[in-house]
Amino acid sequence: MKFEKYESRFQAGQILAEFILKSSTDLKSKLDKFIDKFFVFTIPNGGVPVAEGFCNKLNLKYDIIIVRKIKIPFNTEAGFGAITTDGTILINEPLLNSLNLSKFQLEKSIENTKNEINKRTKFYNKSPDLHEIYRKLIENQYIFLMDDGLASGFTMLAAIQMIKKYKPAKTYIAIPTAPLHTISKVQKEVSEVFCPNSRNTMWFAVADAYQYWYDLPESEVLEIIKKSKFYFDK
């Protein structure tokens, strides 16, 4: 099946919102009746403009959820796990077992990732008391989790694990593009996955779903949230 490419991440978020309204009458009804029970978490950097478009269409609030991959020491473009803002750690055990890392390498990689998360938390001026903030935002609420796309889905799985610790009523993944095998993997952990551009392929790149793709710098993300009507600034 051929898909039209998204013009931008913002437009992808708008299309994603329209897709949900058309494909789930139950969720549309809940949004109509209980909009104050819904909240969005998005993974920066690329997920922020997606959330802007999505929340602009549905009139929802969103916050960032910082998730960073635990980098392989000899291949820092790849990771063997992920850590979230609240310290949730998810390890890809089969991959880790094949890497033959020493205990020192493992602990150093985790420490480096935690330091990176702390730097990002300060950069975005997030409160140090995230546990209480997350509890208020998530407990018994309907949560959308999003990014600009999923590849392996491992960072999203870590985000899901964190969100579920705070006992949401339901958790939904809303994602512009992803391969079917990744959707199948994350579907097991949430109430529902919404993806207008899903592809049955093993070779997948998020960038292929967009007309104009670039790595969003943190400075641009900061400008977006500073000007946003929908960003939850706490």
Image (spheres, helix red, strand yellow):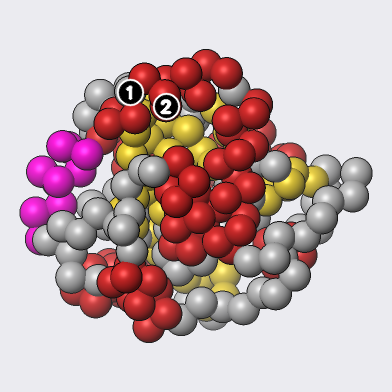
- Give the residue at x 45% y 68%: 45
| Left or right side of 112 for 1 | right
Q: Is residue 89 above or below residue 30?
A: below
Q: In this view, does 117 lie above or below 161?
A: below
- Give the residue at x 25% y 24%: 140
Q: Position of residue 170 (x, y in %)?
A: 39, 25
Number of marks in picture:
2
Q: Position of residue 65 (x, y in %)?
A: 34, 55
| Left or right side of 53 for 123 | left
Label for residue 195? Answer: none
- Give the residue at x 50% y 22%: 27
**Can the viewer see residue 155 in this picture?**
no
Give the quadrant of the N terminus: top right
Give the quadrant of the C terminus: bottom left
Instruction: Find out whether residue 129 is within the magenta segment.
Output: yes
Could you tell me if the residues under marks 1 and 2 are in contact, i.e. CB atoms within 8 Å? Answer: yes
Task: Determine whether the residue tagged by mark 2 lies in a helix, strand or loop.
Answer: helix
Q: Is residue 46 above or below residue 149?
A: below
Question: What residue did someone put label 2 on?
Answer: 31
Range shown magenta: 128-137
Q: Quadrant of residue 161?
A: top left
Residue type beneath disc 2: Leu
| Left or right side of 9 for 110 | left
Q: Is the magenta stretch mostly helix, strand or loop?
A: helix
Report crowding for label 2: few under 14, some 14 to 19, many 20 or more residues within 10 A (C-alpha): some
Label for residue 34? Answer: 1
Residue type beneath disc 1: Phe
